[in-house]
Amino acid sequence: MSVLEILQIFIIIALPFGSIIFLKKKKPKLTKLVDKYGSLFLNIKIEKNLSDRPLWNITFFFLRRIIVTACTAFFIKKVFVQIWAINIISLSLLVFYIGQQPFTSRFIFNLEVLNELFLYVSSFFLMCFTDFVPNPVDRYDIGAIYFYLICSLIVIIWFIS
């Protein structure tokens, strides 16, 4: 491994933690940051009197993408590890969302919890489409159930939006 590759890996791993350090330092000037980078703070509680916990949502945003990308790149032959990573990340974010409630409105909170629950359940369905279920007919039946689950989620989101 070359020095450049090691440096790139370090930067990628440091990005989520660097973002929370940066946001904690800039907390008194957070309103200027919101004006400049508004989409990063969309629907997150960022009042000055509030704790730093809602800012961790941005760090988890970066971490989730880095972990999923790393699992896909480094464990390409080990599908179970990829699915396990998605499962653990979704469960961790569910715990964070329910415990900290970092969003400005109850509607956004409910929508995020619904999406994370769907991802969590979907990660279990993904295992059923691997060699874990050897019979293709069973996979087809499970796929039909999963299809109806996806359709029902889309309908629910349409109605509540």
Image (cartoon, grey):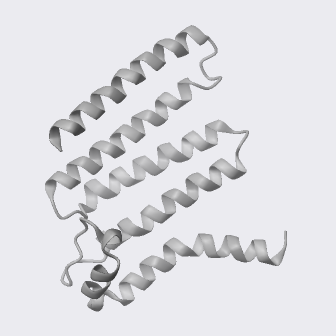
Residue appearing at x 47%, y 17% in the figure: 142
**Picture quarter with the C terminus:** top left
Residue appearing at x 60%, y 43% in the figure: 82
Return the residue nearer the eye: 158 or 25. 158
Picture coordinates of residue 43 (x, y %)? Answer: 24, 65
Question: With respect to residue 146, does 65 lie above or below?
Answer: below
Picture coordinates of residue 89 (x, y %)? Answer: 47, 51
Seen from this angle, which residue lies furthest top?
137
Report whether 4 appears left or right of 148. right
Seen from this angle, which residue lies furthest right?
1
**Picture quarter with the N terminus:** bottom right
- The quarter of the picture where residue 80 lies is top right
Question: With respect to residue 66, does 110 lie above or below?
Answer: above
Picture coordinates of residue 90 (x, y %)? Answer: 42, 48
- The quarter of the picture where residue 13 lies is bottom right
Question: With respect to residue 89, does 30 lie above or below?
Answer: below
Return the residue nearer the eye: 87 or 34. 34
Report whether 141 appears left or right of 36. right
Residue appearing at x 48%, y 47% in the figure: 88
Question: With respect to residue 46, does 93 lie above or below?
Answer: above
- The quarter of the picture where residue 99 lies is bottom left
Q: Tell how many labels.
A: 0
Report whether 95 appears left or right of 62. left
Picture coordinates of residue 135 (x, y %)? Answer: 61, 11
Residue appearing at x 34%, y 26% in the figure: 149
